[in-house]
Amino acid sequence: MSNVPPEAERLLESEPLMAHLGTCAEGRPHVAPVWYRYADGVVEIVTTGQKLANVRENPRVALSVQNDEAGRAQWAVTLLGTATVIADAAETAAARRRINDKYGVDPDAYADNALVRIVVGSATYRTYDDALE
């Protein structure tokens, strides 16, 4: 059972938006944009570099997704969870294809990135526009 409220799930699955992943290593926070895919209480990202290194050191992460229209927030979802780096090449390729498909890019793009799965522990959301109802 997902820890994410149904309305927040609907928002997370609604369109290909940029998320911001917050990691922390050696007592220093690091926030960076990522593409993501959400399903059933789990977020998948494919990444490399500092984000990946931080997750390996400290798996506790935060993810924030916000939809804006003309500079005004329409809704925001914040997730807290535990990240795991998945070493399986086939699982990584399948997740990369799912994410790349969501964002409309070549399914094989970013082939060097690693798969990170985040199990959501808690979620908060807020809508700012009654038009979303």
Image: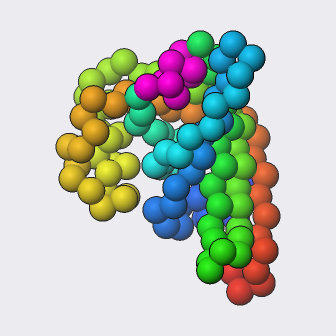
Residue 59, by quadrant, is top right
Residue occupying image coordinates x 58% and y 27%: 83
Q: Is residue 117 magenta?
A: no
Q: Is residue 17 above or below residue 74?
A: above
Q: In which quarter of the image is the C terminus?
A: bottom right
Relative placement, left or right, of 99 versus 89 is: right
In percent of width and height, residue 74 lies at 70, 73
Farthest residue in the bottom direction?
131
Residue occupying image coordinates x 49% and y 45%: 34
Residue occupying image coordinates x 70% and y 28%: 29
- Residue 133 visible to an observer of this rendering: no
Depth check, front residue: 102 or 21: 21
Relative placement, left or right, of 31 versus 121 is: left
Depth check, front residue: 78 or 123: 78
Q: Is residue 32 above or below residue 35?
A: above
Q: Main secondary structure of the magenta part?
A: helix
Number of disc labels: 0
Relative placement, left or right, of 102 versus 78 is: left
In percent of width and height, residue 76 lies at 71, 61
- Residue 132 visible to an observer of this rendering: yes
Residue occupying image coordinates x 37% and y 58%: 102
Depth check, front residue: 68 or 100: 68
Residue 122, by quadrant, is top right
In percent of width and height, residue 100 lies at 32, 51
In percent of width and height, residue 62 lies at 68, 37
Colour theme: rainbow
Q: Quadrant of the N terminus?
A: top right
**What range is drawn magenta here?**
49-56
